[in-house]
Amino acid sequence: MPQRSLLLHRLKSVSMDVLARPVEGATVTADIKHYPFLAIVGQEEIKMALILAMLNPMVGGVLLIGPRGTGKTTAVRGLVELMPLTRRSRCPYGCEPEAAETWGMDAICPDCAQKLARGEDIMGFDRMRLIELPLNARLEDVVGGIDERIALEQKRVRLSRGILSYAHRNVLYIDEVNLLADEIVDAILDAAALGYYNVRRGPLAGTYQARFTLIGSMNPEEGSLRPQIMDRFGLRVVVSGLAEAEERLEVYHRVRTFADNPHEFLALYSPETVVFTEELVQARELLPKVTVTPEAKQMTLDLVNTLQIASSRAEIVTLEAARAHAAADGRTEATVEDVSAVAPMALRQRRSQFMVDYFEESEEEKEEIKAILNKAKR
């Protein structure tokens, strides 16, 4: 039986007296000024959803839904310091051995092809990154296109990587995801479904890998999200403002302190961040060993059936999130308690009343046709 982790407990309650601590001995990287994830007051469901998605890519990402000023973007950007190491291509074009094995040596650049032929490794370890998709991004920015710099400087035509390619093995964050142009949404959906995408510009063609954790945020006041992309987000968190006056005042104190001296504020949270990151790595290593009890599986199926959810992603997301929740708690068995903890995030806003009514009308029509056929046979 593995040792129980404090990860979940630490996620829910970093002590409220952090601001009173001395900073001697604490260190922080000088060029990082994101508000620390563990300094966020309250909003446990936001933090839980993001950590589960980081632990287990099979969860399928997170969608944060709520009004402005509730900490959505701050929480996502705060993940940077918690991100684990991942295998990453050393090539500026993102070449990987997997691409050569799948699509042939033409799928990688000549330099990487020569290195692979010599038995050299073109991959290395690096921390996962947060790739943000600008709201004003063009389709060519997202998928890639003709490299204009090379075309002008070297008089050669070459395809450049897009944002989706840079998001491979990373976290892709889309703020105001409901305001994206349809063509960009379609490109993201295709890449998320396949794990790669194709680009063709005249005689040039390229295939890029794009397996990423998708995180989005939106303000429902500014418009709804297309059902196709809504279904792609594994966990959905409805974010509201903090209700307790004490918590709201604590937010003010922390934000003010961070604004006055970001580096000192980060140093205050550095010890918790280091420990939390270590426990996160341990949980990721434990995840492959986590199984789901039959009772937890049955509970999930009963929930999906009762809620009349058509998409099979409902079961997948719930059970994978339950596995991640168990791993975060240092356990190798996901139980009904784990399902109960993640089900609201995994199952909310998956039921379509339109489809429920549609299926009911179709069933009524089917019975009507059967009755007519039976009558005709007599």
Image (spheres, grey):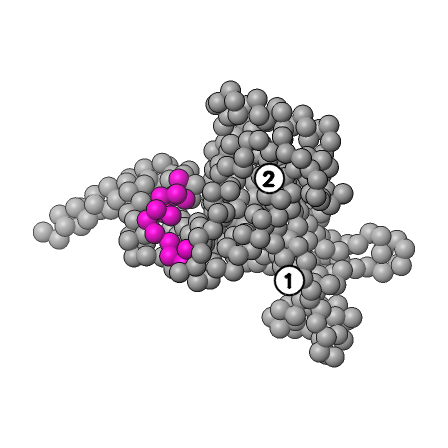
Residue 227: x and y in percent read: 47, 41
Q: Is residue 152 left or right of residue 221?
A: right
In this rendering, the answer to whether 280 lies above or below 350 is below
Residue that label 1 marks: 87
Residue shown at the point (64%, 46%) measured from the top left: 81
Q: Residue furthest left?
A: 378
Q: What type is the residue that disc 1 sits on?
A: Arg
Residue 58: x and y in percent read: 48, 55
Tell which of 21 and 147 is nearer to you: 21
Residue shown at the point (63%, 39%) measured from the top left: 269
Mark 2 vs 1: CB contact within 8 A: no
User: Marks 2 and 1, Cα distance to the nearest angstrom?
Assistant: 24 Å
Query: What are the residue bounds of the magenta stretch?
Result: 331-344
* Residue 309 visible in image: no
Residue shown at the point (62%, 44%) measured from the top left: 271
Tell which of 329 and 116 is nearer to you: 329
Instruction: Give the mark nearest the N terminus, 2 or 1.
Output: 2
Categorize mark 2 by other alpha carbons within 10 Å: few (<14), some (14-19), many (20+): many
Tag 1's secondary structure?
strand
Q: Quadrant of the N terminus?
A: bottom left
Prevailing secondary structure of the magenta residues = helix
Q: Residue furthest top?
A: 245
Q: What type is the residue that disc 2 sits on?
A: Phe
Residue 263: x and y in percent read: 73, 37
- Quarter-of-image position of residue 119: bottom right
Residue that label 2 marks: 37
